[in-house]
Image: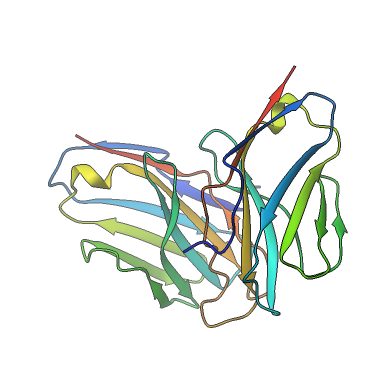
Amino acid sequence: DAKTTQPPSMDCAEGRAANLPCNHSTISGNEYVYWYRQIHSQGPQYIIHGLKNNETNEMASLIITEDRKSSTLILPHATLRDTAVYYCIVRVHGSSNTGKLIFGQGTTLQVKP
Amino acid sequence: DTAVSQTPKYLVTQMGNDKSIKCEQNLGHDTMYWYKQDSKKFLKIMFSYNNKELIINETVPNRFSPKSPDKAHLNLHINSLELGDSAVYFCASSSLQGRPAFGPGTRLTVT
């Protein structure tokens, strides 16, 4: 079962920041927080991941709370092409279940003009 | 260059037939996966192979038989196809510490 909880849907105005929350209250010390997105039945696309520090790349920023029980994915300037289902996943690196991603229902982000 | 590729992209077949989906990755990863996404859009892992050995089988019916001839390939053979097998099947690969990369998917329709 997925170990994360996300709102089922969110709207965002084009050009504004999209803030997608995720709860992972049972996260273990060796589990990373990963974010993927899926645009209209394409293959899931990696966005960003982190362990405890905030992370930023060319696509997004990831803010992880100090207790690591929740995180927020930030798309700084959302465009219509960012409309997708966003998945927050916790994952252990290098375990015997090597790299398995367990997807929840995700958040459907609708970016509106 | 495509990192994770799958063939075919679309597959339409009748109940009872046997079909295969092929997956190849050129990322040098040692672990490969098959995921199934049903009509309700839930993505569920089916199998995982590490260095050609099966390490995860998520209680998938034995009509599904993955085969890994080498680290770069993981094919999925399905016997006696049923209506409920209709779904999009995604292949993925990763290294031990790296993030999984997904293929474009194969849409299987069983009529």
Q: Residue at x 19, y 51 (%)?
A: B18
**Residue A22 place in picture, x, y as percent:** 68, 53
A60 up-or-down from A17: above or below = below
Q: Position of residue A21 (x, y in %)?
A: 71, 49
Residue for point 61% across, 44% down: A7
Q: Is residue A23 left or right of residue A58?
A: left
Give the residue furthest to the top.
Answer: A113
Q: Residue at x 71, y 79 (%)?
A: A29
Residue B93, image quadrant: bottom right
What residue do we see at 66% from left, 58% from top?
Answer: A23
Q: Residue furthest bottom?
A: A96
**Vertical relation: A79 (above or below) A68:** above
Q: Residue furthest left?
A: B16
Q: Look at the picture and state if B95 lies above or below A89.
A: below
Looking at the picture, how far across and down is residue B22, in whole percent? 40, 54
Q: Position of residue B102 (x, y in %)?
A: 56, 53
Q: Which quadrant of the view contains residue A43?
A: top right
Query: Residue A3 versus residue B26: which sits nearer the camera?
Result: A3
Q: Nearer the viewer, residue A18 or B1?
A: A18
Between residue B4 and residue A27, name the one nearer to us.
Answer: A27
